Every structure is written in C-alpha cells, then in structure tokens.
Amino acid sequence: MLSPRRLRHLSASAAILMMAGLTACSTGPEPDPTPEPTTTDEVAVAPEDCILGTWLFDNSHLMPMVAAESGVALDSFTGRITFTADENGIAHVDYVDATQTAQMEDGSVVLVRNGRDSASYFLDDDGSFYTIDVIVDSQITGTAKADGMTIPLDPSMVKDVHSLMSQTTFRCVEETLTMESRGSTATLARVS
C-alpha cells in the first residue's frame, strides 16, 4: 500500500513535472523580446509567408526541453502537437493526447494534455516571431502509479499551466520552424 509520505512525494514530483513538463516553457512574466541576428540565407522566404500554415512538433525534441525545465527525464512523449499561424496574426497550439511518461523513485507519472491554446503573434525583421496575449484553454490530466495503485492527480496542481507559446522565440526557415526556450530548441515540420 502506498504510504501517505510516498503519495505526497509522488504528488509533489508530478506537480513539478506538470508545471514544467507540458509547459516546457515558462513561469513568470513574459520577457522583452531580444532578437538575435540571422544570416541572409535564413530569411530567403519572407517571414510573413514562411510562418503561415500548420506545423507539427517533433516530440523527441520536446523531451530535452521538459528535462531542462523540470529536472525530470521523460521516458516517453507521444501524441500530436501542432502549431498554426494565420494571416491575421493569430496563432494556436493544438494538443491531441500529448502524453508524457516519467519514471520516478516512488513510481511513475503519466500526464496527458488536450485542447487548444491561442495567442497573437508579431514578426521581427530577422524572421523570428514572438507570441503575446497567450490564452491557455488546453487541459492536463494525470495519474501516478505506485505500489500497484493508480491515483488520479488533483486538477488543482495544474491550474496555472502555461502554453508551449509562452516565453518562446520561433524562427522560420523555409520548411522548418524552430521553437527556442531557455537554451533548448524544438523543431517543427510544415504540415500545410
């Protein structure tokens, strides 16, 4: 049987993973954007044309971002996360069964995110762009497993979840979009 002490430890570990893991990007206020120069080759396609469309996140690139943010190494990250930017300056991140699994000392934690986050975005002259006014409408559910028991995690543990668009710089180069946050980079491939 899972002792109250082990349950608290596993719940606390899950909370850390939830707050940093599926957010992979932020806590606190959004920083002022500081664009980095790029080469002429990187902006061969006009930024306003490059960014438009739907992009698919590479989950293997998100795993190191989660580890950097939460201090917890993931065993897996599955599901589908897409980023869409339209010609009106609106961006969305859609999560479809975006599932992370992590083995902890006392058991394992599984977190699943579904739904849509929205934001306004603006382009910089170097082809990068930033999101502002992020609205998080996606939801995270989770379970902890230990001693043969599966325990649903308290939804209040993820009430202040952030979006993958929070405190993030995106750069578009032809058919590749990169997302940079706190020293980690994730790659997205164009879907449409």
Image: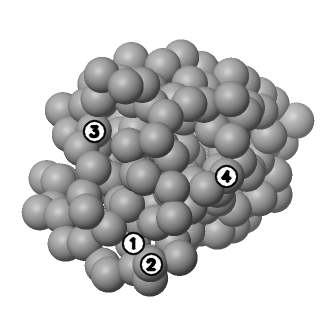
Q: Which residue corresponds to the image point at 56% horizontal and 24% vertical from the top-left?
A: 94
**Where is mark 3, residue-wise?**
121
Residue that lies at the very extreme toward the right in this rendered image: 148
The residue closer to the viewer here, 155 or 12, is: 155
Q: Is residue 59 left or right of residue 70?
A: right
**Where is mark 4, residue-wise?**
175
The amino acid beneath tag 1 is Arg
Location of residue 174 (image quadrant)? bottom right
**Mark 4 or mark 1: which is in front?**
4
Q: Earlier in the sequence, mark 2 or mark 1?
A: 2
The image position of residue 147, as x and y in percent, is: 83, 42
Q: Which mark is residue 182?
A: 1
Q: Which mark is residue 40?
A: 2
The residue closer to the viewer here, 145 or 77, is: 77
The amino acid beneath tag 4 is Glu
**Mark 4 or mark 3: which is in front?**
4
The image position of residue 108, as x and y in percent, is: 76, 48
